[in-house]
Image (tube, rainbow, N blue to C red):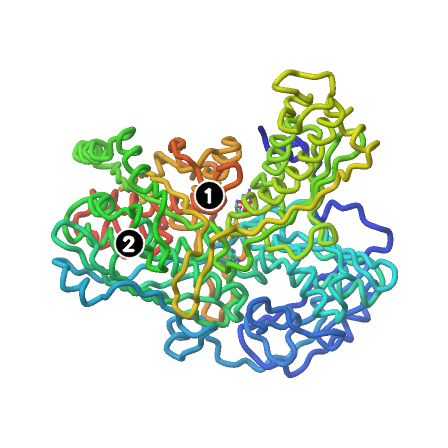
Amino acid sequence: MKNTDSYRHLRGESIYIDDIPEISGTLHAVVFDSPVAHGKIKKLDISKAESLPGVVKILTYKDIPGENQIGAIIQDEELFAEKEVHFTGEPIALIIAENKRIARDARKLIDIEIEELPAIINPVEAKEKESFITPPRSFKTGDLNTGSKKSKYIFEGTAETGGQEHLYLETQGSYAIPKENGNILLYSSTQGPTSVQQITARVLGIPMNMTEVDVRRLGGGFGGKEDQATPWAVMAALAAHLLNKPVKIVLSRHDDLRMTGKRHPYIADYKIGLSEDLKIQFYKVEFIQDAGATADLSPAITERTLFHATGSYFIPNAEITVYSCKTNLPPNTAFRGFGGPQGFFAIESAIQKAADELKIPAYKIQEKNLIKDGEIFPYGQIAENTEAVNSWKTADRKYNIKKHFKEIIKFNAENTKLKKGMSVTPLCFGISFTNTMMNNARALVHIYSDGSIGISTGAIEMGQGVNTKMKQVAANIFSISTNRIKLETTNTTRVANTSPTAASSGADLNGKAVEIACNSLLKRLKETAAELLNVKYEEISLKNEYIYHKNKKTDISWNSLVSEALIKRVKLSEKGHYATPKIYFDKTKEKGHPFAYHVYGTAITTAVVDTVKGVYEIEEVKIIHDFGKSMNILLDKGQIEGALIQGIGWVTMEEIRHNEKGQLLANSLSTYKVPDIYSVPKNVFIEELETEGSKHAILKSKAVGEPPFIYGLGSFFAVQNAIKAFNPDYKPDFTAPLTYEKVLLGLYQ
Ligand code: MTE
Ligand code: HPA
Ligand code: MOS
């Protein structure tokens, strides 16, 4: 089944924030932000800007009726800077005008004086100065000394990954409409409508029930709208609340790039020990995370780095520490993988480093250390139903890793201008919010008198196809056509207290809630049918929109059953609530069972480098992926392709650069290179691993949103290996992205 949105997307008919027909009198707002990374506000003069014809009002922190505080995990972020600014792009004021152009013109007329203070741009400096968001956090398992004694080989090094811009096609935006009696209807392009509702209530000083947040869909989120859709929504709500007029804010691409946080850059210092037979005996790693100026989601992202630091491997003795460092850059935030990819990159770099030193292919080390059932993750969870070895072996059987490696050696011996390299990337990604409390969801299902169905959930459709999956769940339970089912907008008055759609768990959590609600409805419908036919409940089933008795079709259709139920005054609306069973985590011990299950897979990547120009292509990526029992292979493969390309972009070309004053240099698509159609691998093969699936996955169809991002990492090592084939003196540093410039330098260093 195709994504139900695709037809309208293609025709340009889908509605995003900026497409919502405007109510007459709608005002438009533009944010005035800090031009410097750190400083004291000495003077803010808005008078000239405010007197520009068409400007209605300029708001600052002084206009906030409630708290000037938008921090979600830690309350350390002002909506509008009061006395100090902490990053370039930090909002200071909001200009509201008759149209956007006037608001932008007025922005130039605001007169600000800031006394600049020393800014920390580099997270290493932040660590030295102990400028932390939260105290350092560590996971420990086994004993490093024991591991060290058992190690014949010990290597150490550094692995570094850069930031990454989300580049959702729809920029951040919100449209606030005042309703009677001080209530507000808030359209927001957010992954977390409840956070928007909560923070709006806090800033406006009103109860949550006065704000209704409504979301049709997002033009992409990728984590960038889990937390950072909130400020713009709150600003629009504040302006609407104060002016009693509809107010819209849609950030321009430039403003969005400058004002929002990105993926966290990390620096990892590691030490790894291996025994003679290439078993990893210990791994010690210290991550320096560049969190930016405020906490945002960094404490949770820190946590997922800790969880994923040992990648797909069993490492008996490990010590993992993350320093979440406060710098004067925009607060970095959730981005597909949520700190996991940074952990994976470090362990894969450590293994590659060991392989380089031992002059063997990395796959020989990787294969020896894949986690198996019964082994324990550093966070205490016992590995169950692992598919690491199975997916590796399946990939090997299909694609013969050793033979492929030998063919590349042969190719390299016969070619000078072009050199090839390969890598293998095993995947093991934990599914559940690492914060146990967040793993719950609700759904509301109405069956209407004509047999059509309306479903509301807490899930946000952002292109990943969660609404399509919700339809499938309901259609499957009632055995009716998906055409009868509509996914309503995600709305805080219909489904309350939701977790954001994130952690790849949107379909699982909300799907299970839909399943629970639909099963209750099904039970009542079957009771109605049994009564109608005067037979036993157990003998009734629904199939293809008809009622079956003892597996024989009756003449009662879905529609007539629904009508009959209404005549009998049966309740045809239901709410489902789901909370993932079994999971827990004890933060005092840093041990527990945080994940409902893991997603596995193996990717084989081949890259080819042009040794004259220094350019490269990712020739091929072959993936064996553990979908469980995919409920929608078209959508799921789409997720893998998208995540793969996003991962490749991160490690090979996307480079977030700031100047020494902390101003973003990569502030447009001419200075920030993202993968385009020419940079995608020439061949991508994705095959399903035959597995049982997990009962915690919706219809045993495992979560797929973030995990395959990890497959992209293989392109970094494949390109490096191609360089090594040309230049035996190449001393790789494990610093991503591996841009064309670095490749050229590597070829001739
Ligand atoms: N796919 C599309 N097309 N657009 C997106 O914004 N976000 C990703 C992933 N796939 C995203 C996407 C991220 S970061 C997450 S957490 C999951 O989708 C969230 O959706 P799910 O929980 O329904 O998988
Ligand atoms: N993953 C993604 N987003 C989140 C998480 C997580 O584990 N926790 C809070 N937000
Ligand atoms: Mo995804 S980074 O959990 O929104």
Question: The C terminus lies in which quarter of the figure?
Answer: bottom left
Disc 2 secondary structure class: helix
Residue at image point 54% right, 60% down: 437
Where residue 529 appears, as percent x and y from the top left, is 72, 26
Position in image of residue 624 (x %, y %)? 36, 35
Q: Picture coordinates of residue 587 (x, y %)?
A: 43, 67
Is residue 251 shown left or right of residue 267? right
Q: In the displayed structure, does residue 372 sit left or right of residue 589?
A: left
Is the residue marked by circle 1 packed among few (<14), some (14-19), or many (20+) residues within 10 Å?
A: many
- Sequence-wise, the earlier of marks 1 and 2 is 2
Which amino acid type is marked by label 2?
Ser
The quadrant holding residue 463 is top right
Nearer to the camera, 500 or 359: 500
- Using the image, tell me which numbered label, if any, was put on residue 630: none
Eyeballing the image, is 44 above or below 316?
Answer: below
Kind of residue sitting beneath label 1: Ala
Q: Is residue 405 above or below residue 740?
A: above
How crowded pointer 2 is (Cα within 10 Å; few <14, some 14-19, many 20+) is rated as many
The residue at which mark 1 appears reads as 643
What residue does disc 2 label? 349
Residue at (71%, 57%) from the top-left corner? 249
Regarding residue 512, the answer to whether it shows in the image is yes
| Contact between labelled residues 2 and 1, with CB atoms less than 8 Å apart | no
Does the numbered disc 1 mark a residue whose Cβ is under 8 Å from ligand 1?
Answer: yes
Q: Which residue occupies the foreground of this view, 455 or 312?
A: 455
Q: Name above or below for residue 134 compared with residue 624.
A: below
> Disc 1 on helix, strand or loop?
helix
**Which residue sits at x=48%, y=73%?**
133
